[in-house]
Amino acid sequence: MPVRSANRSGQAYGFLAMTPIKPGEIEALQQYLESLRERGPSPLSRVSRTHMARWVIVPKFHRKPAYRQRKDDMLEIPSLIFSSNLDGDLDSYLDELCEALAPEAPEIWGRCIGCPPEAKGTALKEYLKFNQVDCGFFYAAYGQATVSKVRRTLEQRDQLVAFAVRSQGLSAEELQGAFVEEFAAS
């Protein structure tokens, strides 16, 4: 029996890369990431196979006595964590990500130790893969559903809700006719 990947749930893949931030760059990186919200849609939305993704700056790990950790895990240097839940295989996804985020990548990963000078293309992809950390446990709520399937399903739900609101007060016969007209082609 093949070994199941800790990064896979159904057809979905969980990717996590942890890259150390260059000394003196943490504040600029944080400001840049926060500014992405103000600019409109996330650049990650340009990668159509992304279910969910995010960047998190981790200045250090926190140890809480209540957690009863076996040992203290401390970072020697603040790190940037990039995580993504994606459809399909990692290699082609990272190709798409590195192309779609070419304008932003130098401002993000370019502030990290070891990032290639141009922070794009195959060199960036290899950098991200080099810094990949296995998820350990990855669960995708809709592991068999692709991003496009989830979007289609949400559109159908919205269509059905709009129909229900519009059809309030119709007789049974009118409701049946309106339903068939609205959804027969779907």
Image (cartoon, rainbow, N blue to C red):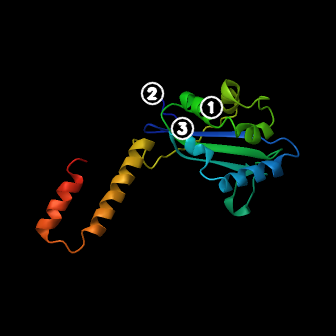
SS assignment at label 1: helix
List the residue tagged with mark 2.
Answer: 2
Amino acid residing under circle 2 = Pro
In which quadrant is the N terminus drawn? top left
Q: Position of residue 56 (x, y in %)?
A: 69, 50
SS at badge 2: loop
Relative side of 105 to 5, left or right: right
Numbered label attached to residue 99: 1
| Residue to which mark 3 is pinned | 6
- Residue at 71% x, 38% y is 105
Q: Earlier in the sequence, mark 1 or mark 2?
A: 2
Mark 3 element type = loop
Q: Are marks 1 and 2 in contact (CB under 8 Å)?
A: no
Tag 3: residue type?
Ala
- 152 sits to left or right of 168: right
Q: CA distance from mark 3 to mark 1?
A: 26 Å
